[in-house]
Amino acid sequence: MSTPSPSENPTVPAAEVNATPGLEEKLNEFWTRHRRNLAFAAGLVVGIIVWRGASDYLSAQNEQALGAEYAKATTPAQRQAFAQANAGHELAGVAWLQVADAAYADGRSADAIAAYQSAGKDLAASPLADRAALGLAMSRLQSGNAAEAEAGLKALTDSSTVAIGIRTEAAYHLATRAHAAGDDATFRSLATQIMQVDPASPWSQRLMTLQVAKATPAPAATASTAAPVSAPAEDSSAGIKFNLGK
């Protein structure tokens, strides 16, 4: 009698006849089918990593070279040339600020206005943009354009996103103008605003000095007094000197 084959023997489990492929066999089969795609993908990832590393390195090198070039610019003319050659970069904006500060200090308000405007463009995404806006307002005030100057100072004073130091300085300059004009209501309002924003600010302390001086009665004139004592020049709008470095 012949022996039945395993497929004909009902007592032999089917799993023993057709064994399920193991994990290793499946992985080998997957690799055989897709090895080209996998190799390409792996090469692509490595290429991206290398490209990013090279790009970051070159960017760092360029920034370092730009910083060295900026450091060599030590005069207003050199800084202006640097700013014009690197328009759009934050360092160009910083260079424009220095050019503008020098022009303001020399009383060249038109040059200062132009330089502060250029600085504002290059520093649009930087906190220093508010610094440029303050300089622009003060330069306009220096040029005699009081309406635009006061509008710029008020915008800085009332903005909660502006740095505290810039806000209090802008408010101080508005307050001194109100003080010089005899506008007590505006002066008191700005004084209160400054104290709320930053009571420890040097601008708050200067304003307190003005408040004390305003509240102190002027001494009565005597026979020996030749002429009335005039208010200190620093209290008048013509004598205001803003300090952008504080």
Image (cartoon, rainbow, N blue to C red):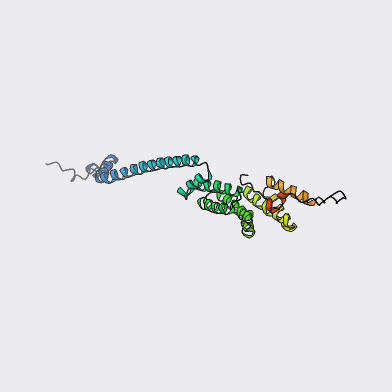
> Split into 4 quadrants, where in the image is the C terminus?
top right
Q: Nearer the viewer, residue 178 or 230?
A: 230
Q: Is 63 left or right of 219, judged from the image as shown?
A: left
Nearer to the camera, 41 or 94: 94
Is residue 185 visible in the rendered image? The answer is yes
Vertically, is 211 above or below 25? below
On screen, residue 40 versus residue 121, left or right, reads left
The percent coordinates of residue 6 (x first, y second) are 18, 43
Q: Residue at x 37, y 42 (%)?
A: 49
Q: Does residue 161 show up?
A: no
Picture residue at 42% right of the left edge, 40% below the top:
61
View extreme (bottom): residue: 147
Query: x%, y% of residue 120?
Result: 54, 52
Please determine whether, in this image, residue 75 is positioned above or below residue 184: above
Q: In the image, residue 171 lies at what x, y percent?
A: 66, 52
Q: Quadrant of the N terminus?
A: top left
Question: In the orientation shown, which residue stands out farthest toward the left?
Answer: 1
Q: Nearer the viewer, residue 65 or 202?
A: 65
Q: Tell me where residue 32 appears, x and y as whole percent.
A: 24, 43
